[in-house]
Image (cartoon, helix red, strand yellow):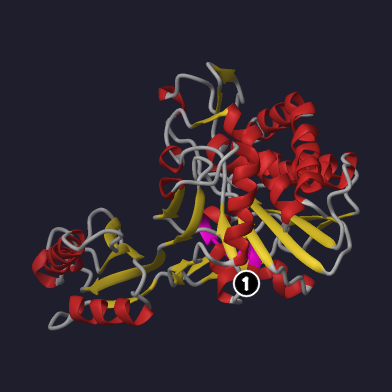
Amino acid sequence: MNEADKNKHIEAVIDAVDEHRDEILAFAQELVGIQSYPGDEERAVRRVEAMMRHLGYDEVTVDGMGNLIGRVGCGPRVLMFDSHLDTVEVNDAEHWTVEPFSGVIRDGMLYGRGSADMKSAAAASVYAAALAKRVGALEGLTVYVSCSVMEEDCDGENLKYVFEQSGIRPEGVVICEPSSNRIALGHKGKAQMVVGTRGVSAHGAAPERGENAVYRIPEIITRVEQLAGRLLEQDAPRGTLVLSRISSVSESLNAVPYECEIYLDRRLAIGEDEHTVRREMEALVDGTSAEWRFGTLHRRSWTGHEVVYEPVHPPWRIGTDHPLARTCAAGYQAVYGRPPLDAEFTFWNFSTNAVASTALGIPTIGFGPGSPELAHMRDEHCPIEQIIEACRFYAAVIYLF
């Protein structure tokens, strides 16, 4: 196909998106209006399932964990787009300037929990695949659109389940997390750990008979703070460490605590890995009675599937010369009329479902509407123009893949 014909076909894909602009935005609004915390996403899943069927997907399934997978096309090359449908909770609704689940559009912004992270992207990807099929842009291609669950608590376990149970092995995965419509070439890794001290319980009226576990933790906290400071002194992109929770256990409020734990969140820069974390943690507890372990989580999905999550993931990065990155750059040019500048590539400082695809060696890249800085924030919002631009981008990448 010559360049003129190629550009004509890309224009047809983008025009199809623009023709359905109002539908795409209305669907994004509707998804934001559905509360879907981790483990309680069924309503959102069923709504997207119905939309996929309405839009003419060739196959729509919900797996045993509750993830939704839609397919269009049946060619030998396989491309996947992934968005998660769960959101973090809203515990400060009285301080929002809009109702958190209203899905209201105001001053060119879609407001509400999940508008940036990441129901706008879900709506855009669902429509992009359907419209690419409608205009005949799927020659030799199979496209899967996954709308996954429980990402906020257990990132990657959803796609790991999809890959294991379905046998799907894409040649490329686009993670649709918010990137302000910049091409994300990777993200930091992470490890989450628990450090605990133990004491001896005693009645609060006779504390001398016990050993207070809380009193044993300050030295560990000081070491954590010192390590976090040393990490911040390194050149960016650097790793980070945060003490995110402290708790104690006692027989009652009138008793000496016999356990105390802190929870640590460690983000890993390129070049750091699990061995890095293990060395740091051994040094952290060295010479004390404290013990540490990785902070394994146990969760249950809306289908009743038991999830055991090991929060240890390495960082990853894809090169700008990789075929998938070049395809995305071409898709960017199709949408914006020019190649992406260096500043229009980014590197996420948070973790995503890409931990599952990259662990299998599947080429992975990111692109999504909304600012990542607004994820989990009060008055979360997403520019509606970015939603439409993201849909154009996804549709163009499908055609160019």
How many labels sit on residues? Answer: 1
Binning the other alpha carbons within 10 Å of mark 1 as few (below 14), some (14 to 19) or many (20 upward) gives some
Residue drawn 82% across the image and 46% down it? 5
Of residues 196 and 224, which is closer to you in this image?
Answer: 224
Tell me the element at label 1. loop
Percent across and percent down for residue 225 are 16, 61
Q: Is residue 110 above or below residue 64?
A: above
Q: Which residue lies under the disc numbered 1?
A: 362
Residue 85 visible to an observer of this rendering: no
Residue drawn 64% across the image and 54% down it? 149
Chief secondary structure of the magenta portion: helix
Q: Quadrant of residue 365 in the image?
A: bottom right
Percent across and percent down for residue 102 are 60, 24
Q: Quadrant of residue 363 in the image?
A: bottom right
Of residues 260 and 14, which is closer to you in this image?
Answer: 14
Of residues 148 and 291, which is closer to you in this image?
Answer: 148
Left or right: 276 as drawn, with respect to 80: left
Residue drawn 67% across the image and 65% down it? 172
Percent across and percent down for residue 296 are 46, 71
Q: Is residue 242 above or below residue 136?
A: below
Left or right: 257 as drawn, with respect to 180: left
Magenta-tinted stretch = 153-159
Residue 129 visible to an observer of this rendering: yes
Q: Quadrant of the N terminus?
A: bottom right
Q: Is residue 397 magenta?
A: no
Percent across and percent down for residue 305 are 69, 65
Q: Is residue 331 above or below residue 171?
A: above
Q: Which amino acid does the dot numbered 1 rest on?
A: Ile
Left or right: 344 as drawn, with respect to 4: left
Q: Quadrant of the C terminus?
A: bottom right
